[in-house]
Image (tube, rainbow, N blue to C red):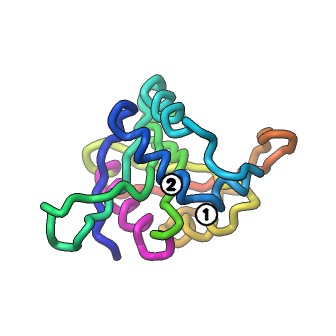
């Protein structure tokens, strides 16, 4: 598993770096029939995080050189979640995103492990919930692999001109 770290993202400091992560995830945007990340999307997303109570955006950092903290790190992904929502003790995971050059290397799993440990311990969360678009089997497989299970619930939401079915998943967190 990769060695990663997590940092809170600040709109003034990290918008450009997050926009670069978005640029390195063209397949994500293609799922929504977009040619790539819209200009300024990262700044809008980070501003929205700041405005929503309990919502956090953590950057996934990978050291530039393993074992050498003085070599710095690069932002390669994002964890977007909302604490104690929709009820106390629950975290709603909005997005786990890793730039394509770093996918399938254990980065997202390592980042989730760090976050899960913190959620179950210091944040007082016992349940994680999320939704996955039915047309995103890669995300569905990833979340199942890290212990999430389908609840049998689903809902539809409008995405552009089409309705998208969202599959609800959850995982109990043990502190």
Which x, y percent locates residue 38?
Answer: 63, 41
Query: As rendered, which of 102 and 57 lies closer to the eye?
Result: 102
At 40% across and 60% down in the image, what residue appears?
A: 112
Give whichever of 12, 173 is nearer the camera: 12
Q: Are marks 2 and 1 in contact (CB under 8 Å)?
A: yes
- The residue drawn where x is 37% and y is 49% is 59
Mark 1 closeness class: few <14, some 14–19, many ≥20 residues within 10 Å:
some
The image position of residue 29, as x and y in percent, is: 66, 53
Q: Which mark is residue 33?
A: none
Residue 116 visible somewhere in the drawing: no
**Is 118 left or right of 37, judged from the image as shown?**
left
Q: Which mark is residue 139?
A: 1
Q: In this rendering, is residue 170 above or below 92?
A: below
Assign the magenta stretch its main secondary structure. Answer: helix
Q: Quadrant of residue 132?
A: bottom right
* Left or right: 139, with 6 as reference point: right
Asked if the stretch drawn in magenta spans residue 107, the answer is: yes
Task: Sort mark 2 into few (<14), some (14-19) or many (20+) by Cα contacts within 10 Å.
Answer: some
**The quarter of the displayed image where residue 102 is located:** bottom left
Magenta stretch in the rendered image: 103-119
Q: Is residue 26 visible?
A: yes
Question: How many angstroms separate mark 2 from mark 1 (CA)?
Answer: 9 Å
Mark 2 = which residue? 96
* Image spot of residue 149 (x, y percent): 59, 63
Q: Secondary structure at mark 1?
A: helix
């Amino acid at each position: 598993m990769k060695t990663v770290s997590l940092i809170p993202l600040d709109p003034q400091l990290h918008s450009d770096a997050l926009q670069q992560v978005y640029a390195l995830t063209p397949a994500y945007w293609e799922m929504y029939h977009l040619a790539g990340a819209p200009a300024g999307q990262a700044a809008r997303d980070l501003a929205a995080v700041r405005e929503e109570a309990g919502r956090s955006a953590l950057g996934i950092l990978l050291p530039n050189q393993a074992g050498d903290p003085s070599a710095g790190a690069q932002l390669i992904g994002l964890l977007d979640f909302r604490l104690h929502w929709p009820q106390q003790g629950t975290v709603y995971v909005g997005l786990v995103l890793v730039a394509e050059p770093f996918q399938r290397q254990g980065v997202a799993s390592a980042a989730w492990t760090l976050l899960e440990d913190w959620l179950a311990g210091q944040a007082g969360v016992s349940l994680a919930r999320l939704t996955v678009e039915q047309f995103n089997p890669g995300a569905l497989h990833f979340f199942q692999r890290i212990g999430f299970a389908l609840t049998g619930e689903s809902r539809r939401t409008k995405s552009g001109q089409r309705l998208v079915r969202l599959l609800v998943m959850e995982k109990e967190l043990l502190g």
